[in-house]
């Protein structure tokens, strides 16, 4: 067996509070362990969002008591709660600013409020941006002006990664992450998958995807899942499971709601990247840097003693090799042939996963 460190997923949506029908701390952390992740960094676009110290502390306390692995929460930037940022900065792992279309209420459109977030946030913790196209350049300009570290989340386009590379050459403190689904899917897959391939940023062209691979391990320092589970009935456009089942039984479409963007990824990310290693698309050393070394350094995370992941890097199988632990119960990568299977996960000396089974007693 190949031994990896307990991996870090720097971008997950665990849906607590307010979206527990999609995911919760137990199911999300179970999916993490099944996917080889022992540390999760959770996003703040919950309901209510984590834009006040009270809301952040409530979510963190619940995670600490329920999650089967380590969970750290980001704080969210909000025009209505700028006064909370200095308090949140003392505890949150980073600040998340949504500058482009996203799922939830946290999109920032007032430039003065965005600048105030940069001004108030300390320089020793990253400001993570959902930024696309021109918003990437705006974030880079603000990082330079305020001498802050920005981290571009789920980068998706050739133009964006080239802007990041140019900023890094200029000495601006900017890092970037990419998701496995942007590395493995393009706009052609979005058409094939329909609602189950709808995400933000949207899937792009083959040329965009090629650029992501070209910059992987250099300008792009992190791979993250952007695990964003939604129930199947939501992806089908219905307000409830019952409405979805009723429509199926009647073989007719009811009035549908907007489709929420996002896909689950905690259980598929490492298998996908191990498959890429088997195909010679990246080295195992680079995989470890992208999924452990770099996120640990960027977010200043503590060591996990006696923690590791055992992988059979030569095992070939059809994904998934176990019933999915994510509450949403689906993956756009189902039925994909993969190489590299997660055999066993040990967290602080305790076996927490082995051959498809998560140990729920910690």
Image (spheres, grey):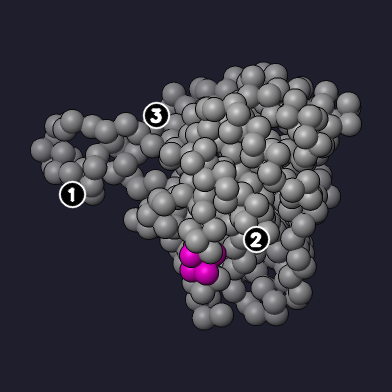
Q: Which residue is mark 1?
A: 242
The disc placed on residue 194 is: 3
- Marks 2 and 3 sit apart, C-alpha to C-alpha, by 39 Å
Asked whether the beta carbons under mark 2 and mark 3 sit within 8 Å of each other, the answer is: no
Question: Element at badge 1?
Answer: helix
Position of the N terminus by quadrant:
bottom right
Kindly report the secondary structure that dominates the magenta region of the rendered protein.
helix
Q: Which residue is mark 2?
A: 91
- Marks 1 and 2 sit apart, C-alpha to C-alpha, by 41 Å
Q: Which residues are magenta?
A: 58-63
Evaluate whether residue 226 shows in this view: no
Question: Element at badge 2?
Answer: loop
Mark nearer the viewer, 2 or 3:
2
Sequence-earlier tag: 1 or 3? 3
Residue drawn at point x = 64 percent, y = 36 percent = 116
Asked whether the beta carbons under mark 1 and mark 3 sit within 8 Å of each other, the answer is: no
Picture coordinates of residue 89 (x, y %)?
66, 54
Picture coordinates of residue 235 (x, y %)?
34, 39
Question: Element at badge 3?
Answer: helix
Position of the C terminus by quadrant:
bottom right
Mark 2, other Cα within 10 Å: few <14 / some 14–19 / many ≥20: some
Sequence-earlier tag: 2 or 3? 2
Depth order, front residue of 149/347: 149
Evaluate whether residue 256 shows in this view: yes
Residue drawn at point x = 32 percent, y = 31 percent = 258
């Amino acid at each position: 067996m190949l031994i990896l460190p307990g991996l870090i997923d720097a971008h997950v949506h665990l849906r607590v509070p307010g979206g527990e029908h999609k995911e919760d701390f137990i199911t999300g952390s179970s999916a993490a362990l099944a996917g080889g992740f022992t540390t999760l960094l959770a996003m703040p676009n919950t309901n209510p969002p984590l834009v006040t110290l009270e809301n952040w502390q409530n979510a963190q306390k619940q995670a600490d008591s329920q999650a089967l692995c380590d969970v750290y929460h980001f704080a969210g930037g909000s025009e209505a709660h700028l006064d909370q940022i200095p308090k949140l900065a003392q505890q949150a792992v980073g600040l998340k600013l949504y500058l482009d279309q996203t799922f939830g209420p946290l999109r920032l459109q007032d430039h003065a409020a965005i600048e105030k977030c940069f001004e108030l946030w300390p320089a020793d913790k990253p400001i993570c941006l959902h930024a696309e196209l021109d918003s990437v350049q705006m974030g880079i300009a603000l990082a330079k002006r305020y001498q802050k570290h920005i981290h571009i989340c789920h980068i998706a386009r050739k133009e964006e990664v080239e802007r990041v590379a140019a900023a890094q050459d200029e000495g601006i403190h900017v890092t970037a992450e990419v998701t496995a689904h942007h590395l493995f899917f393009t706009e052609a897959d979005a058409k094939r998958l329909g609602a189950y391939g709808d995400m933000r940023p949207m899937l792009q062209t083959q040329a965009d995807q090629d650029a992501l691979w070209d910059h992987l391990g250099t300008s792009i320092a992190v791979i993250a899942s952007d695990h964003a589970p939604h129930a199947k009935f939501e992806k089908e456009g219905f307000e409830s499971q019952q409405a979805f089942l009723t429509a199926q039984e009647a073989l007719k479409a009811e009035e549908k709601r907007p489709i929420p963007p996002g896909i689950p990824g905690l259980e598929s990310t490492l298998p996908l990247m191990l498959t890429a290693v088997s195909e010679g698309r990246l080295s195992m050393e680079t995989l470890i840097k992208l999924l452990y070394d770099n996120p640990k350094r960027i977010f200043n995370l503590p060591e996990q003693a006696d923690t590791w992941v055992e992988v059979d890097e030569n095992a070939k199988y059809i994904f998934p090799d176990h019933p999915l632990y994510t509450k949403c119960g689906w993956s756009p990568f189902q039925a994909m042939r993969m190489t590299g299977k997660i055999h066993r996960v040990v967290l602080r000396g305790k076996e927490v996963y082995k051959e498809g089974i998560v140990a729920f007693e910690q």
